[in-house]
Amino acid sequence: MQNGFHRLRRIRSRWWVVAFGCALFLAFLPQCKRVRALVDRTPAQRLEPTHLAATHTAVLEIQRRRQPLPSLRDGLRDFRCIFHAHAEDSVHTGGTRPEMLADAIKAGVHAIFLSDHFRPPRDFMDSWRGLRDGVLFIPGSEVRGFLAHPTNSVLDHMDAPVTNFVNAMGAGEGLLFLSHIEERPDHSMENLSGLEIYNRHYDAKRDIAGLIAIAMKLTAPESLATFSRLVQEFPDEVLACQVRRQEAYLDKWDQETAQGRRLTGIAANDCHHNQVLIVKMIDTNTVAVGTIVDKDESLRRVTATLRPGIRTMTQGHQAGDILARVDLDPYYRSFRNVSTHVLASELTEPALRAALRAGRAYVAHEWICDATGFRFDVAQGASITSRTAALMGGELTLEPGLHLRIETPVSCVIRLLRNGQEVAQVEGREWIHRLTEPGIYRCETAFVIHGELREWIYSNPIYVR
């Protein structure tokens, strides 16, 4: 699946000026919409230099206040994993597996679930598998609207009817997650392991005006210099400017679990390292804008009639020269943007598969802060040290004395949800909540950053019957 920037090519030229005007309007829209004293900024507003600087300062303070949490009980460890990762698997993928490995080590990633685009007759299960320099690779594919991670080759089932396909992928310890929920909101979840509850690509798809605004920043010397500097100074904040709570994904999850299904929620990095933006000279009055994986005919042409600064950019250059190059999504940055933490007994493929099938996982936007050690469980008592009765993904029967227990490495806004509806909200690092009725419970955490609520952690549910 191509990232959102490539959708620019689908906008017909007669709409270009209109879309550009809309982008400029959004960029300078007064930041006045407030709900309970909190602003709700557009991605374009989040790219303003003053906001990026303020966000960066706030994030550094959050990270400074982080306190490591005690080791997990029950012999489990917290492993940071990446799902929906592409390398060397399509014409629109810019990154390589060695590059991915190096950035995983740098980012503290323990395991990567690869999602190769299916390209018969190549078998995606023949990709990297096992430990490489301490990082565990698990092969898989983004195919037919799913993230498929079977245990063995399933080439004979790739074109089977959907029911047979699903059963083949999930056989044994196989995992199958519904992907890109916005494209298939009514898809059956029968026999699936779970679904994406966040997808980086969806944020980009929802921000076409912002993507056009970024493209325009590249076509004037002053705005290009400013944007390049901001990417260097605030790389995580720039990539995260589009990140928003994805209601379509979360609503689907809540609706399906309320019907009695046990579904594990994971994050989709959808990383390709293909959002390396370029400006290529066509002639002294014309440039082409796009990414490193775009063919020349797919690049968007912009003329000096619309952007007079182009004439300055092309001075002294020849046709075909690359006038600008801005890398938005190296794997390292994508891995920090969001990850899926899996609570497993050891860093092995069978252990991670078992933990994911059991729902022992949570999603975190760690460009803000490392979430390692986060805990959401049920305790047999009203203490942070009470004995554990159920972990994330666990199921138990309601009885007197049970309490939901939440613990985070740094004080944040914590929302507790039951059957998708907010039950209570507090601010702090620890929270004990008495269980009084059955339901599907999960929690979300966030930070107030520069007057705006920014999402941090999404737990998997605990099923109280």
Image (cartoon, rainbow, N blue to C red):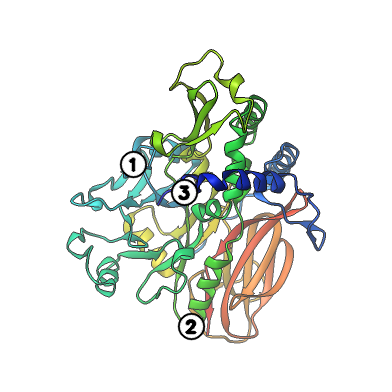
What's under tag 3, amino acid-wise?
Arg
> Callout 2: helix, strand or loop?
loop
Residue 403 versus residue 58: which sits nearer the camera?
58
Marked residue nearer the N-terminal end (3 or 1): 3
- Which label lies toward us, 3 or 2? 3
Identify residue for label 1. Answer: 91
Q: Are marks 3 and 1 in contact (CB under 8 Å)?
A: no
Question: In the shown orientation, is residue 425 left or right of residue 138?
Answer: right
Say if 345 sits above or below 227 in the image: below
> Callout 3: helix, strand or loop?
helix
Identify residue for label 3. Answer: 10
Residue 267 versus residue 163: which sits nearer the camera?
163
Marked residue nearer the N-terminal end (3 or 2): 3
Marked residue nearer the N-terminal end (1 or 2): 1
Instruction: Give the x, y percent position of residue 458.
Output: 57, 62
The residues tagged by marks 3 and 1 sit, at their Cα atoms, a distance apart of 18 Å
Identify residue for label 2. Answer: 259
What's under tag 1, amino acid-wise?
Val
Residue 277 in view of the camera:
no
Say if 114 sits above or below 52 in the image: below
